[in-house]
Image (tube, rainbow, N blue to C red):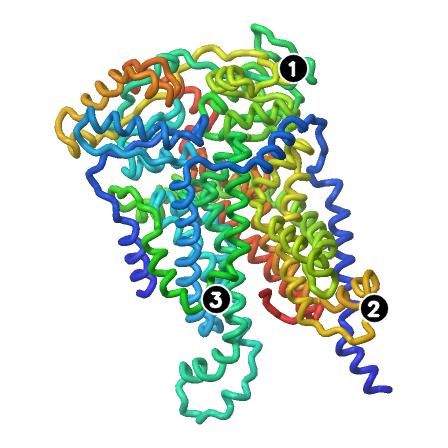
Amino acid sequence: MPAEKSAQRQFSSGRRLAFVSLLFVICAFCCVPFADIAIAQSEPGRELLRMLQGLFSPHWQDIGGLLSALGSTVAFALLAVALAAVLGLGLAFLFHWRLVRIFAASTRAVHEIFWGLIFMQIYGLSATTGLLAILIPYIGIFTKVYAEIIQQQSRIPASTLSPQTPLLSRYLYTLLPQSWAQIQSYTRYRFECALRSSAILGFIGLPTLGFHLETAFKQGDYSEAAALLLIFYMLIASIKYWLKVRLIPVYLIVAVFLLPDSPAMGGSYFWQFISQDIWPRAVLEGQWGDALNWYQKQFMQLALPGIGQTLLLTQLALVLTGLLTLLFYPWGSRLLVGKKLRLGGAGFLLVMRSTPEMMLAFILLLVFGPSGLPAVIALAVHNAGLIAYLIARYSEVLTLPPDAPRGFNRYFYNITPRIYPQFLALLFYRWEVILRESAIMGILGISTLGFYIDSAFEDMHFDKAFFLIVITALLNVLVDMLSRRIRQYCQLQEQQPG
Amino acid sequence: MFKKLLAATLLLASFSALADTFTFTAIPDEDEARLQERFNKVATYLTAQLGVEVKYIPVKSYVAAVTAFRNDQVQLAWFGGLSGVRARRLVPGSEALAQGYEDQFFKTYIIANTSTGLKASDKFPVGIAGKTFTFGSKGSTSGRLMPEYYIRENLHKVPQDVFSRVGFSGDHSRTIAQVQSGAYQVGAVNYKVWETELAEGKVDPAKVTVLWSTPAYPDYQWSIRGDADKRYGKGFTAKVRAALLNMKDKDLLASFPRESFVPASNNDYAPIEKTGAAIGILDDND
């Protein structure tokens, strides 16, 4: 009996999970009165009808242009992930160095779009910009996640080695082989994310699918937009059929040739950018008092209200993401639905997670009018699609006893409680991602941090943009730390998606 | 060390294009989907006229066009009033060469959803205060700069304090779509885009209507970098200007869409510069 009790105490993190979940739901309810989520009267019928018509009549004229956009989308993602994986793996072994941890945290705290905007100032619209915009944040992500995977491995094989064995050999022959399967699976999952990032970089002008998608959507050519979206969905859905480990070297070589040609740039703007463009005039002139005033003014007028709006939206979107995830994951799980339904469910989840949030936000903007509401829903739908997909995959490794309940009972009393810790862990991982993404919803007329950053870039006030990006990154790091604390408190295993 | 190596490799990979091609771009403000197709024709025309290879590269935003001009990725650009001023301030010696005939007296329309009950007038429609409002792109002359100037001038407040909500649709066509659907009640739009979409039947006059037109101001123009003569030979700038002014083919002009091109100078855009400074978006030390 006492043994059983202590076992219960040891494994029952259920109470803590419930407490944390409840806390977040209450917190979201408290956000509602302050968040900007009014509904405006509108008649979106005409526009929505045109979108629907477009969806059912996909059409694309310029096949050559389409193929080249498809090529660069895949090329950016492949090359960036391959490089980032190698570098990340190297850095993962140095993760005990504080400098490496800071590097990893700060690079992944900035959204790919913002990296893209920064590198565009230096390298123009070029392949370099596209590669770096994905490469840099992904190095940070891989470094952290690989390090965590390696940390979880057993130290027993290493203890059988002679003490004289060099450190590198220890890693290569004991820790790496154990982690390999997990690392591979995670990298594969990240490749899908990189394809999305690569496509979205088209929104700021790189010649990927997003370039044409944004154009078609913006111009109301919904048939073309639909064609592009469908192609993008098919690209994502088919990854598992063509991404074979043995073929990767071949793909990489082809990818180098698929990179878009870039117009040459006169001179290097790198130095000018980091030594002049990103600093306010007062700093360049050495007027430290004025500089301090300047930064204080930016902080009070832009950053602070921006942080407020961003956090409000994030908390709401986070809770809604959780709800939608619980609602949608069963449709992708073999244990909960039949084969036909699951195929449909998996397709639905793919559409949810692969439709760029910006497009969802625009459609919802037409329906609900401008406010935080379209942003919250768009973020929640996108992220719920992603987490639900991962949870559904995770649920399939669970084993059911022969007398397991069926139908709703199985969902409520067996599977959901068993995946709940994993679900919460993933949700907390996405927390910082949602925060990052909520920052890019400027079109909705809500002044998140991203709105101010985008404005600063548009007005070519790079000093302002740089300062705000640093603030955003710090906020991200903070949320990341908090989410790690909470995961520890809930005794959630640091298990990785994928 | 490793990072340097990496950066070098990446750079090499990106420098595959020739340096002596004459490259131009155009701000994406209308019917973007056909930009590539239409401007490639312009590139062919300029190649024949100038005797150097001319290429067009598409960009997604006003600021990307300005950056490409500053970074010498493009030597010639079809800018809006504000983006042209910005670009020429960043590249010493650069010049406005030619503007569209219509650009000498460009206008912005303030449009409203008919459910607001607001009516067209000759005077600034003060009734728009308190409504939701969308500009076009943040860096647009007709979609942002001019309407914001007249809003401040007439209502003595910044737009954020005048309206219950201020959005940036990012594009004139989207401004129309959003005001038409009622997502925003009022908006500011480039008059050329409005008239084109009206003619194409994309605008439903029962849903959205023009309230007011701003006074005329100078807008779009071709600008060239100051070092063009040094790089492409003496008299090259004059040659480019002549080629632009001699563009008579209706099909080419429809790319812009303009009736014809007339000469322009940097001074023509002094009013834009003043307006930009007045509302603080051209102020470097803001």
Q: Are marks 1 and 3 on the same chain?
A: no
* Secondary structure at numbered mark 2: loop
Marks 1 and 3: which is nearer the front?
A: 1
Q: Residue furthest right?
A: A1
Residue displayed at 81% across by 87% down:
A3
| Quadrant location, the C terminus of chain A | bottom right
The residue beneath circle 3 is A143
Instruction: Decide if residue B267 is in sight here.
Output: no
Host chain of mark 2: A
Does residue B281 appear to the left or right of A39 in the view shown?
left
Q: Label for residue A405?
A: 2
Q: Are marks 2 and 1 on the same chain?
A: no
Residue displayed at 19% across by 38% down:
B20
* Secondary structure at numbered mark 3: helix
The residue beneath circle 1 is B206
Badge 2: residue crowd in 10 Å (few <14, some 14–19, many ≥20): some
Q: Position of residue A108 (x, y in %)?
A: 50, 57
Residue displayed at 65% across by 56% down:
A343
Instruction: Say what amino acid the circle numbered 1 marks.
Output: Ala
Instruction: Decide if residue B225 is in sight here.
Output: yes
* Secondary structure at numbered mark 1: loop
Q: Are marks 2 and 3 on the same chain?
A: yes
Q: How far apart are labels 2 and 1 at the CA level?
A: 58 Å
Q: Position of residue B249 (x, y in %)?
A: 30, 17
